Image (cartoon, rainbow, N blue to C red):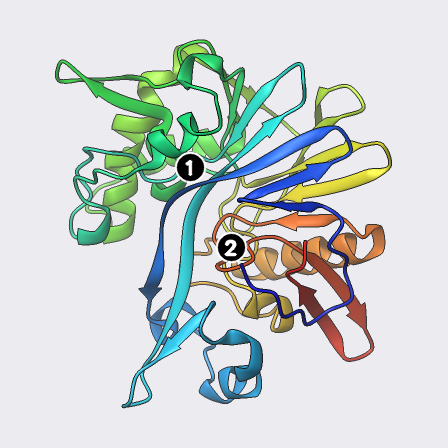
Amino acid sequence: MTTATHGSGGGQYFTGNNQWQLGKIKITRIEELIGPLFDPVTFFPDFDPAVFAAHRTWLYPDHATSSATGKHRIIASMHSWLIETGHHNILIDTCIGNDKERMPYRDWHQMNSPWMNNLRNTGLGPDDIDYVMCTHLHVDHVGWNTRLSDGQWVPTFPNAKYIFAKREYEFWEAERASEDPETFRAVNNQTFDDSVLPIMHLAELIEGDTELIADLLSIHPAPGHTPGSITIDLKDQGHQAIFSGDVCHHPIQVYEPHWNSAFCELSDLAKATRMNLLETCSDKQALLLPAHFGGGFAGFVTQSDAGFTFDFSG
């Protein structure tokens, strides 16, 4: 957990051990893996090493690494968010999953991760989950939707309703029918087959702004990274949290909101959605819980004339 801060949020929500408290609601980060997974030169098309140098005081070692030759890697976490309301157990994004064919992504291929044990360590198991919500349908957000049983992919959470955007499903359904997809799309086609289609009988496809639990949890379109990406708002006792999926992959994008990842489908819309998210978080002092931020994992956005900053105190 990063203790240094570089914004003006507050530490009132973080309770330790990968847990946050929002009013009466408990939020737990369920880790699959974390490490220096990506080359920023290829991950961020607009990468500028001078920007990393300017943010050196907080980037290293929790959010980036640098070798003796000056080659950078960005730290990324693959994790889910578990929400316990007292009435519902809700899982947001389900990472990569075990036993899945993910070549040429060797780090994700045929995984045997501790994710399920990490979930069980919360005192809950797969049968206890009421909702599974995917912010979008990329390979690293849907994997644990299913598990391998007797050679078949079956729902990991048999009592849950799986929720994601209709627009997102239709986009990847169309991609599945396309010929000769490039590598990332080919892997996502495999993902669609093994991690999305087997749960569709348990799925609800939503459109537009949707209130899932009255006065507590709502879903909002956040297109750009993918056409049907969503954010999820959680409110309790005057506090607010926003689960943002991949609107921001890495905290450097708080400072450089015009930096898209190489995996953003709709470039201009992704930038506009990111700006809107950051402005909303700042205006409402909402706790931001992204899908991939490293050490600290969640925190607060502050906006000034100089731009945005981020505080990992959470």
The residue pinned by badge 1 equals: 137
Q: Is residue 105 visible?
A: no
| Circle 1: element type | loop
The residue pinned by badge 2 equals: 266
Q: Report whether 194 appears left or right of 5.
A: left
Q: How crowded is mark 1: few (under 14 residues within 10 Å), some or many (20 or more)?
A: many
Mark 2 or 1 closer to N-term? 1
Amino acid at pointer 2: Leu
Q: Is residue 251 above or below residue 54?
A: above
Q: Report whether 109 appears left or right of 172.
A: left
Amino acid at pointer 1: Leu
Residue 92: x %, y % from top left: 52, 33
Q: Which numbered mark, 2 or 1, is in the foreground of this view?
A: 1
Instruction: State the separation of the CA atoms marked 2 and 1.
Output: 15 Å
Q: Can residue 210 be seen in this view?
A: yes
Residue 308: x %, y % from top left: 72, 70
Q: Residue at x 42, y 19 (%)?
A: 125
Q: Is residue 87 above or below residue 58?
A: above
Q: Which of 226 and 148 is in front in this view?
A: 148
Q: Residue at x 71, y 34 (%)?
A: 234
Residue at the extreme right: 238
Q: Which residue is drawn at 63% across and 72% down?
A: 255
The quarter holding residue 251 reads bottom right
